[in-house]
Amino acid sequence: MLDWFLNLFTLEGLWHFLIGVGAASAWHLLKARMQGKIVVFKWKYIALPLAISVVMYTAVQNQQNADCVREFNQVLRERSSVTSENDQISMYQRRLIYDWMHSLVFPPPGIAQLDGTDPAREKWAMDITLETDKQFRASLEQQRENDAHRAANPLPPPTCGL
């Protein structure tokens, strides 16, 4: 909304302002000389606009810098959430594999008493393996969906400072 005003206080706008002040001062000096008047040069007419323009330029640049930092932090938070989602899926997958292997090595007491070739123990091992595989494949599918969603909706890069 106030971009036109803020753009006045860029480095280019500051130079235009100073050129305008210099041109106006030169015109008044030239006009006074042509009329034969003695010109008393008062620094306050140059120093005051210059000081105001420097203060305004500094204030606007500080605000633009704050906006840039805010935008950059937002992009970092968005990228961090993507990493966090990937970490959660990865930890879930590792936990599935650990629990599966632990169950096979240390079966429940009723299953542990059975012989390794017993059909009930083999059925239990196949059931737990199939269930783990089902859950692992579901987590892989979730990861693929996340990757496809991110590919279709990429995070915007920071635009400040460009």
Image (cartoon, helix red, strand yellow):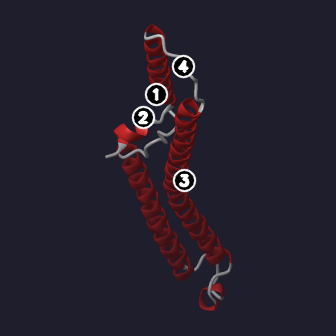
Task: Give whichever of 11, 19 is nearer the camera.
Answer: 19
Q: Amino acid at mark 2?
A: Leu
Q: Are marks 2 and 1 in contact (CB under 8 Å)?
A: yes
Q: Amino acid at mark 4?
A: Val
Q: CA distance from mark 4 to mark 3?
A: 55 Å
* Residue 39 marker: 4
Q: Which mark is residue 73?
A: 3
Q: Residues within 10 Å of mark 2 (few under 14, many from 20)?
A: some
- Mark 4: which secondary structure? loop
Which comes before the other along the chain, label 1 or label 4? 1
Q: Nearer the viewer, mark 4 or mark 3?
A: 4
Which one is in front in this view, the residue at disc 2 or the one at disc 1? 1
Residue at image mark 1: 17
- The residue depicted at 52 percent of the width and 53 percent of the height is 70
Q: Position of residue 126 (x, y in %)?
A: 51, 72
Residue at 45% x, 56% y: name it. Answer: 143
Q: Give the percent coordinates (x, y) of residue 9.
A: 47, 36
Location of mark 2 (residue): 8
Residue 49 point in image, percent of width and height: 52, 35
Q: Nearer the viewer, mark 1 or mark 4?
A: 4
First in sequence, mark 2 or 3: give its number. Answer: 2
Q: Are marks 1 and 3 in contact (CB under 8 Å)?
A: no
- Residue 92, labelled with which disc? none
Give me the C-alpha separation between circle 1 and circle 3.
34 Å
Crowding at mark 4 (Cα within 10 Å: few <14, some 14-19, many 20+) = few
Query: Which of the two discs, 1 and 3, labels the residue nearer the N terminus?
Result: 1
